[in-house]
Amino acid sequence: MKRRHTADFAAGKPLKGHVMVGPTHPLRGSGRTADSLARLGRGVTPASGSVRRRMSWRVPLALAMTLAWPVAGAESFPPGETTAPDPDDLAIEDLVRIRVSSIARREQDPYAAPGAFHVLSQEELHRTGVNSIPDALRFVPGLQVARLGAHDWAITSRGFNGLYANKLLVLMDGRSVYTPLFSGVFWDVQDTLMEDIDRIEVVRGPGGTLWGANALNGVISVVTKSARHTQGGLVTGGGGTEDRASGAARYGGQIGEDSWYRVYGGYLNRDDSALAYGEPANDSAQMLRGGFRMDWEPADVSRFTLQGDVYAGWLDQTATLPILTPPYVSSMDTRMNLSGGNVLGRWVRTIADGNEVQVQTYFDHTSRESGFLAEDRNTLDIDSQHHVEIGDRNDLIWGLGFRVTGDQLENRDASIRMDPDAQTDLLFSAFAQDELTLVEDRLKLLFGSKFEHNDYTGFEIQPSARLAWTPWERHTLWTSVTRAVRTPSRAERGISLQTSVVPGDPPTAVTLFGSDRFRSEALRAFELGYGAKLNDRISLDVATFYNDYDHLSSTEVGMPFQGPSTGTPYFVQPLVLDNLGTGHTYGAEASGTVKLTPRWRMRAGYTFLESHLELEPESTQLGPTILSDPRHQFYLHSSFDLPADLHFDAMVRYVDELKDGSIPGYVGLDLRLAWQPRPNLEFSVIGKDLLDNQHPEFNSNSYFVQPGEVERSVYAKFTLRF
């Protein structure tokens, strides 16, 4: 790694594409710490009038391109002149057949789920042409998804977005990937073979009653296919302007009469994104990944699963770090080395109808090494649950859990320190939820709670109650009241982070400190929604919510003091993390699917989000907290099957400007054209973000790492099954 001292900073000028954290505004935005400890000192660029004028023609152009080809094609040939897969397998009926489990921790019809719920099926993942899980989440109403460059993402549900958005729980086949270091998800390593994903279940709204702390605003659960359903071979590969090269291979076979397996391996090489002025952002990435899964079903009453993954790779990044000598900031090119692996086992046994026991355990190891901090973490988790029907009216599920996670940290730069440098945390949990039938096939009440004990705040209780009314089959009107919490992260208790240096004699280092008094953020959520399959061609889902937050993260200004006497003398201006923020958010989410013809399907979604955050009177935070979330979002996905084994998909999305004014709104257009000459062979070309050479989607709330902008890209891919 190397440092570059830039004379422009002495004159108060930022490096191109870098966040200004030098002498100009050392405390700007110091209240923005709700999600990642990292909202100090970031520059803000308000949406300009010229951007708004450009938007005025991009929206109708994108919609026209999305609709024009299917409409023309629909009139050019009669139904039945293609050997494409049966469109019935790609439409609303798929969702009816899917059994989901994230709302009640047991399989159920999604139309009967009493919550804001969305499912991305394998067919939707395939037709959108996405190459990563984060990219697929753009097509889920209620989620805020923004790309910060080649490998970084900001993803959340119902607000409070950030690089490490801390109010969203993410599960991979039941394995939590929520990091206790900063609270959030390292999306750069959350991946698998896209063709092996069965579905992605998204719960918008609190899920703490069943899934525990940190599922404050939502749960994302990625569910992969059983090895039984991935038999034979698969080879896929491609390349393009941004995803320069990628490839994967998978093979599945059978052992005896009741056991199946698969193994896979993959490679990804991603190019740099662009800075605002067009230069490369130095954030290219390469990753190798492999894994296996075995499923054993010795009898109708038992199922065993054993699976695991390993990965290794690197990510480039450029960081701007404060220093105590002129020009008071330096730029450092560094490479982050990533590696890890996990193994998970699950046993499910059906004792009798409506009586089932499940035990799951996993071990996870992660290693992240950058130029300023290195982390090695091991996690062991054991979870059990029992589902039992009591009489004709009570459907009870309860369970116990234990997790131990230990880390070893290495502080590699004076600007950031974690204390202590090694720590082990324990988590004990229990939950119970009963589904009480009040009126058979018409009215149900779900109520329960999660009980947890953690090493930071002790006992936490997260109750909920949900009422579901089904006036007709596959029509559900539901409402809920829930309490959920987000527990403190390792950093919020023990970090020391220099965010900027104010010139002077001596200079002043503005430093963020964690605090032992930092406690859990709390939420009281009220929801009302309606989901239905209106007929064989139309499905609809609408959800509204009001969220009331207490004890939100705040950054309190402390009294300055003199720094250590060794080296350059300086003063320290402390900023101490506390919980003096409150506020509320409210909004609405709507989505629907329409099967216009046997060959043409359309999916659409809309999200509205409003937020009002405040500080307690005793707070010394400089300025109110402003969320980095859009007020309006919209997407439209058109899927059309053409003659000659061709398939055309067009996706348009609109994202409003961020409420903090840092990023203007934008319209994105993605197109996919695929040719399937044989049932087991497909070639496709995907164009993404076609309306702009490049555009920003988020202003990184990391103190150090500069964000890149999303560039227009084209990608070609083939998939062969045998």
Image (tube, rainbow, N blue to C red):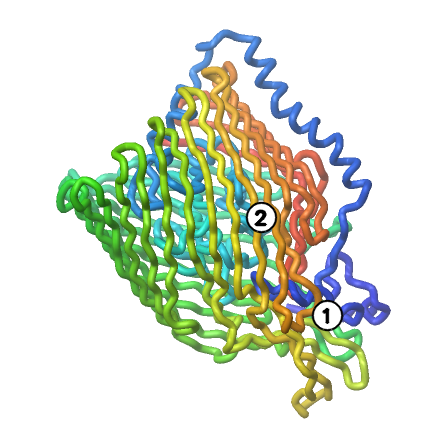
Q: Is residue 5 above or below residue 431?
A: below
Query: 346 or 315: which is nearer to us?
Result: 346
- Disc with the residue nearer the chain's start (2 vs 1): 1
Is residue 292 toward the left or the right of residue 239 in the image? Answer: left
**Which residue is tagged 2?**
270
Query: What percent of the width, then of the height, locates residue 146?
Result: 60, 48
Judge whether 415 appears above or below 441 on screen.
below
- The x, y position of residue 642, in whole percent, is 52, 17
- Which quarter of the rendering shows the N terminus? bottom right
Mark 2: few/some/many CA within 10 Å (<14, 14-19, 20+): many
- Circle 2: element type: strand
Which labelled disc corresponds to residue 332? none
Q: Amino acid at mark 2?
A: Arg
Observer-nearest of 496 and 605: 605
Residue in view at x 64 percent, y 75 percent:
575
Q: Hey, which quadrant is residue 428 in on the image?
A: bottom left
Q: Is residue 585 visible?
A: yes
Q: Quadrant of residue 224?
A: top left
Left or right: 288 in relation to 224: right
Q: CA distance from mark 2 to mark 1?
A: 35 Å
From the image, which quarter does the C terminus lie in? top left
Q: Secondary structure at mark 1?
A: loop
Evaluate whether residue 256 shows in this view: no
Please give the name of the residue rendered at 41% of the width and 52% of the height, measured from the top-left corner: 207
